Amino acid sequence: MQLIDGKLVSKHKKDEIAKAVAEMIDNGRRAPHLAAILVGDDPASMTYVNNKEKSAKSAGITSSIYRLPADTTEEKLLETVDFLNNDNDVDGFIVQLPLPRHISDSKVIERINPAKDVDGFHPQNMGRMVQYLPSYLPATPYGIVQLLDYYNIETEGKHCVVLGRSQIVGTPMTLLLSRKSRPGNCTVTICHSFTKDLPYHTLQADILIAAIGRPAFIKADMVKEGAVVIDVGIHRVDDTEKGGSRLIGDVDFEEVSKKVSYITPVPGGVGPMTIVGLLQNTLRAAKKEIYP
């Protein structure tokens, strides 16, 4: 079994981003500017946004965070989105999800200028991705594809099973791996909460991508010998032995790692590469590579 080290790969990718940013500045251009809107004080969201800010700054990218209280109205949030849409000093921005229940995620996402939608969630960017046109790719699937590429994991002709059909991970992941590209050319099966006999499908997977939001759900008897396992889940669970808590994924790592050829850890696997995907999209936005 070989560990897919997201921290290692992300460092390599961030060094590449930092070099490109330095070249922009040397050529008389300003550094790319990434902004984030954070509504409320959800601990996971706060940690994630702070990590994005730290990573952006380490790569030479300017970072701003707009913090709004949990009781912010939808109208106020949309006004903030409009402000960033019209700020010429901001190349790209994200609205951290999930939002409070009284705010429509889709309404907010659709309000973002597609040219600044570096999360890749706007319908225009999703549609361009479906049609194989240049677009900002959703950061997590973008990061996963780069992990597969970095470790030279063969995808052509392989059977990939994706657990989860969200617009953030599952659905775009199936599209990217079925593309005529490298990594790509997979036969992809997407499974979800209504899939019957789930182990039947997972046991056929050469590449298994777990993004179902259920801690340690995937057990060894659900995974084919020698499979590649990508664990997108992240959950904080009690750890009574250590008197605190720890992070785990959707995969029972201790069991499954004994059976597979490659596997991502949690933490330190997919998470760092999600941030890399966001920074790469921001760099492309600053360079006007997608929307001149």
Image: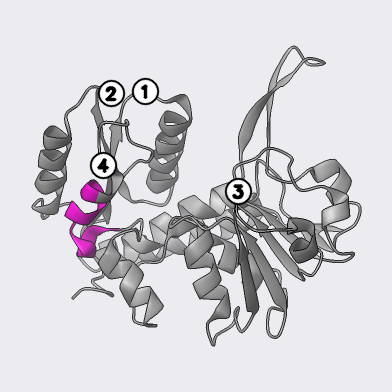
Instruction: Name the residue: 58% across, 62% down.
Output: 144
**Quadrant occupied by the C terminus:** bottom left
Q: Main secondary structure of the magenta part?
A: helix
Q: Earlier in the sequence, mark 2 or mark 4?
A: 2
Q: Give me the disc on residue 212.
A: 3
Stretch of the chain drawn in magenta: 107-117
Q: Earlier in the sequence, mark 2 or mark 1?
A: 1
Task: Specify few, some or many for label 2: CA neighbours under 10 Å numbering under 14, 14-19, or 20 or more.
Answer: some
Work out how far the residue at label 2 is from the one at label 4, CA to CA, in angstroms. 14 Å
Specify whether residue 191 is painted magenta.
Answer: no
Q: Give me the disc on residue 70.
A: 2
In the displayed structure, 143 sits above or below 185; it is: above
Task: Specify few, some or many for label 3: CA neighbours under 10 Å numbering under 14, 14-19, or 20 or more.
Answer: many
Q: Earlier in the sequence, mark 4 or mark 3?
A: 4
In the displayed structure, 46 sits above or below 95; it is: above
Q: Give me the disc on residue 264.
A: none
Does residue 153 appear left or right of residue 34 in this picture?
A: right
Identify residue type, mark 4.
Ser
Residue 227 horizontal/vertical position (percent): 81, 65
Task: Specify few, some or many for label 4: CA neighbours under 10 Å numbering under 14, 14-19, or 20 or more.
Answer: few
Callout 2–callout 3 Cβ contact below 8 Å: no
Q: Which residue is mark 4?
A: 104
Q: Which residue is mark 1?
A: 41
Mark 2 vs mark 4: in front: 4
Callout 2–callout 4 Cβ contact below 8 Å: no
Instruction: Name the residue: 28% across, 60% down.
Output: 122
